[in-house]
Image (spheres, rainbow, N blue to C red):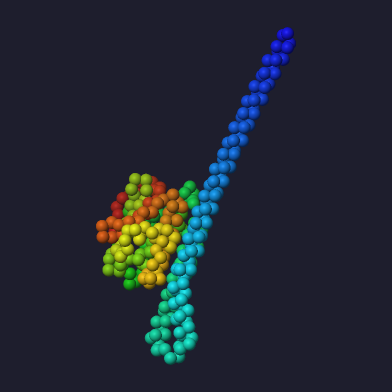
Amino acid sequence: MAIAAAMLVAAVLVLFVARRFAEQGYARRERYRSQLFDAELDALARLREASRIREDLIASVSHEFRTPLTAIRGSAATLAARGDRIPPESQRALLSGIVEHADRLGRLLEDMLLAASVRPAPDSGAVADVTAAVSRFRLGQARPPVVLEVEQKLAAYVDTVSLDQVVRALADHVRADARRDRTVTLRACRQAGEVVVDLFYGSTRTEGELAELLEPFGAREAAATGRPATLALYVVRRLVEAHGGRVIAGRDGDQLRVRIALRALRPSADRTPVGMPV
């Protein structure tokens, strides 16, 4: 009897241990299955986002490219057919138009490729000098006057190349959109744990129209108004969000404002702003 009881107890212990191992194995399988499911959902979400961006760009490209292509073809055809009978001044105007529209197509293509190639990198550890990058903001000749109000020693978690592309895209947007009789102000400062860059400028757009420019080809009025189509603010949004920042567009009094907030590296020891007209 004692031997039978011992064997029964041993069998129960074996069954108990086997059940515990089975439960642990089942729990591991369920955990792995859950991780695989989450990874699959994440991959599907990325594919859907990529598909949405691609569809938006494809749907818009024929509209946005048709106007400059038509102008280039028309000017070239006119020069080819009647170039010897066109006054020199008109020839130069047609050639200048061809160059202008070709440049416009080039900028659109570059912005499309840049927006499509941006990949999330919020934890890359890259750090950029925001003070230096923002201080390089320029619009060129025959553009609105620019005033920079930039604090010293601002640094944020973003790589230098991306930050330079953000500043370049902001300048492209202002060239296409700002009124030339109003001053453009670009400010950069630290607020709590963020480096905040504010762009103020005059424009005939409404606040809602400005917000639409954060989407790919959000403004579709180029053909109707002649205002150049631009992906500049969409590029800004994609680059900033890829590094864990945010972009807000709206109205501030009688001006429009584009605000960029990046994750700050550390408090600035010297908070004295640099004010410089450009």
Q: Which of 260 and 17 is in front in this view?
A: 17
Q: Please name the residue shown 40% across and 89% down the image.
A: 87
Q: Where is residue 222 in the image (x, y as percent from the top left)?
A: 40, 69
Task: Indicate the position of residue 216 as horizontal and vertical percent values.
Answer: 44, 60
Quadrant (top left, top right, bottom left, bottom right) of the C terminus: bottom left
Given the current orientation, which residue lies at the most extreme left position? Answer: 253
Name which residue lies at 40% across and 58% down: 214
Viewer-proximal residue, 242 or 267? 242
Residue sticking out furthest to the top: 1
25 and 198: which one is in front? Answer: 25
- Residue depicted at 34% across the width and 49% down the height: 190
Q: How many labels does the image show?
A: 0
Vertically, is 146 above or below 191? Answer: below
Residue 257 placement, left or right of 60: left
Image quadrant of residue 71? Answer: bottom left
Is residue 178 something that shows in the picture?
Answer: yes
For image coordinates 37% across by 62% down, the residue present is 137
Residue 233 seen in the current view: no
Q: Which residue lies furthest to the bottom in this view?
A: 85
Quadrant for residue 207, please give it.
bottom left
Quadrant location of the N terminus in the rendered image: top right
Q: In this view, does 264 lie to the left or right of 49?
A: left
Where is residue 35 shown, x and y percent of the image?
57, 40
Q: In this view, does 57 lie to the left or right of 135?
A: right
From the top left corner, tell me how far across and down residue 90 is, in percent: 39, 85
